[in-house]
Amino acid sequence: MTQVQTHEDPRTAMQVYGQRARTAARQVRKAADKAKAAALRAMADLIEERGEQLKQQNALDLEAARKNGLADALIDRLAITDKTLLSMATGLRQIAAMPDPVGSLGPTTTRPNGMRVAQMRVPLGVIGIIYESRPNVTIDAAALCLKSGNATILRGGSEAFHSNQALGGIIQEGLARAGLPQHAVQVVDTTDRAAVGAMVTMTEYIDVIVPRGGKGLIERLSREATVPLIKHLDGNCHVYLDKAADPVKAHDVTVNAKTYRYGICGTMETLLVHADVAGTLLPPIAATLVSKGVELRGCERTRAILPTALPATEEDWETEYLAPILAIRVVDDIDQAMEHIERYSSQHTESIITEDLAAATRFQREVDSSSVYVNLPTCFADGFEYGLGAEIGISTNRLHARGPVGLEGLTTMKWVLTGEGQLRG
């Protein structure tokens, strides 16, 4: 893997990464889909061949993380297991097989003078990814950026340094095997925080930044960045059990939404329950959650039903726990549930459990989040589950991309007009 010399000043080094990426972007933009797919399949093969080596490098990161007292949820994100390796290889092959979005045309309109007008999908250019803990993001981001015709600069967190450098080597070998420019994907080889500050202001080289990490990181980047960001600040996700909820679905979906994995942004953090069914639905749900080690915090009406729940505070409604803690509120009706979501949600993912079509329709139309579900756990908030192959992140932005960002979210449109010599009179 070609590296920038780490003895250089980080800002100077990032300029080199940027220059290389901009040059590579011009080549990747015109690369044939056959070459891009071949590179992705080669990366998948290399991950399978070198799985033990990757786990050895990951073990160095895990050891350091435990010594540094990294939270269990973050250690879970950091670990490369056999399942992780299989998921990375499978994702690469799925993305390789997906239709190439670059060059596709939208509907064509013929103007009265015979001129044909359409829009063509094109790459964004150079994408910077800044992320923490999760080495699988290195593969997902590289694959999605390459398939969509972009060059990318990847700056992972220091806690995953060895893992990311090993994966970066595999990515660049895969590019080389397919005859694509080595610098189409670059993994930054310094942990100096100044590199992050440089990336988010390199408007001459980077077209968009995608941050993936904790609220503190994204708040910092939002303050400092002059490059546009595709981001979400946090994942304060809600499930609402409507008065017409099926009890079995209500139980199973709620438990899955909270306990599938605590450290992902799609985990349910607040459960809202209609007052008419709270006394019936809450006790069995609570019993299962407590048996799985989840701490419950509730409003006064919740605690009247679940006396062992701790009192919920205003801060609980605002918190993305990323931990086995759940806030519960009993509400009068769907309107109060949606008012709570409007006030406290991070506009990430919300779900209603109901057999009432009118309630489901209202919830999906009126709740203003990037993903809104009916009878599903919020942990489905993932590009892979949406059929995108993988995701580069989840956006709560209103402009350009919203929700899980896959291939199309990493492209933009340009107008293409075709005529036979018409003149404007």
Image (cartoon, grey):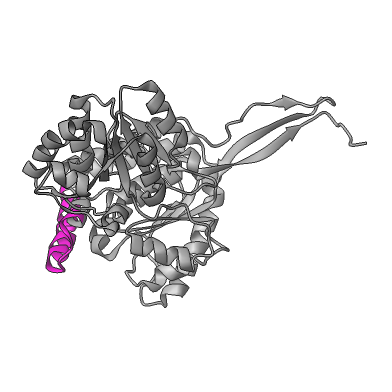
Residue 228 in sight here: yes
In front: 401, or 185?
401
Residue 357 in the image: state x and y as whole percent: 38, 21
Q: Position of residue 330 (x, y in %)?
A: 25, 41
Q: Residue at x 49, y 57 (%)?
A: 21
Q: Position of residue 180 (x, y in %)?
A: 45, 46
Magenta residues, as a range? 52-73
In the picture, measured across the screen, residue 167 lies left or right of residue 280, that is: right
> Was residue 68 drawn as part of the magenta stretch in this picture?
yes
Residue 245 position (above or below residue 273): above
Residue in the picture at 23% in, 39% down: 257
Residue 384 visible in the shown view? no
The front one of 248 and 64 is 248
Q: Is residue 86 left or right of residue 147?
A: left
> Is 237 displayed left or right of 311 in the figure?
right
Considering only vertical position in the picture, is 137 above or below 376?
below
Q: Quadrant of the C terminus?
A: top right
Question: Is residue 151 in the magenta section?
Answer: no
* Above/below status of 274 relative to 354: below
The residue that appears at 30% across and 58% down in the rendered structure is 132
The residue lying furthest to the right in this view is 425
Q: Quadrant of the N terminus?
A: bottom left
Tell me which secondary structure the magenta stretch mostly adopts: helix
- In this picture, residue 109 sits left or right of residue 171: right
